[in-house]
Image (tube, helix red, strand yellow):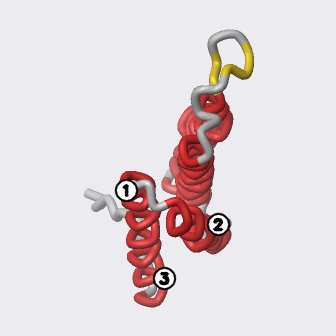
Amino acid sequence: MKEKVESEYIIPARYRRLENMHIAFWLMKDISWCMIWKTLGIIMIIPTLSVAIYIAYRTKNIKSELAHNLAVVFWISANAYWMISEFFKFDTILIWGSYTGKHLAIIPFTIGALILLYYYLVQRHKELEEKQVVTM
């Protein structure tokens, strides 16, 4: 009987440290938002988003990782926009109908969700089909 072997995704230590630092940046940004520390919150967008973009770029050849990391980039973008809308008090200003300034964050949130939806509905099936053809 043939034993099923799972592929491994190994993260080099330097990348793992960067990912851990990314979490610290993200937490500092969100703590600043919670505490209404505007300057620090806005400053923390730069390293948080920059590292997220770098992580996505670094995983560009692994479609599943890229999809999830791009979703994180758009999630942080939406989150940062929402924070800024509250800091500068345009979060409650009506933009269109009953939609306010903070509701525009739905655009990057949706882009991230659509990337994941595409991955799971289209790309993942292609990967599984290719894996079956290789193992047959």
Q: Which mark is residue 94?
A: none
In the image shown, does 98 or 121 lie closer to the viewer?
Answer: 98
Q: Is residue 33 left or right of residue 99?
A: left
Tell me the kind of residue under disc 1.
Met
Residues under labels 2 and 1: Cα distance? 26 Å
Closer to the chain start, of discs 3 and 1, is: 3
In the image shown, does 14 or 121 lie closer to the viewer?
Answer: 14
Q: Is residue 54 above or below residue 107?
A: below
Q: Do labels 3 and 2 touch, CB within 8 Å?
A: no
Question: Where in the figure is residue 9, as x and y percent of width and height?
Answer: 43, 71
Question: Where in the figure is residue 114, as x and y percent of width and height?
Answer: 63, 34
The 10 Å Cα crowd at callout 3, few under 14, some 14 to 19, many 20 or more, is few
Camera sees residue 111: yes
Q: Nearer the viewer, mark 2 or mark 1?
A: 1
Tell me the kind of residue under disc 2.
Ile
Residues under labels 3 and 1: Cα distance? 30 Å
Question: Where in the figure is residue 25, as x and y percent of width and height?
Answer: 45, 71
Residue, disc 2: 53
Residue, disc 3: 15
Q: Based on the displayed image, in which of its 4 quarters is residue 28 positioned?
A: bottom left
Residue, disc 1: 35
In the image shown, does 30 or 119 lie closer to the viewer?
Answer: 30
Closer to the chain start, of discs 2 and 1, is: 1
Q: Is residue 97 above or below residue 71?
A: above
- Residue pushed farthest right? 96
Q: Nearer the viewer, mark 3 or mark 1?
A: 1
Residue at x 32%, y 59% (from the top left corner): 4
Residue at x 45%, y 86% (from the top left corner): 12
Tell me the kind of residue under disc 3.
Tyr
Question: Where in the figure is residue 91, as x and y percent of width and height?
Answer: 59, 33
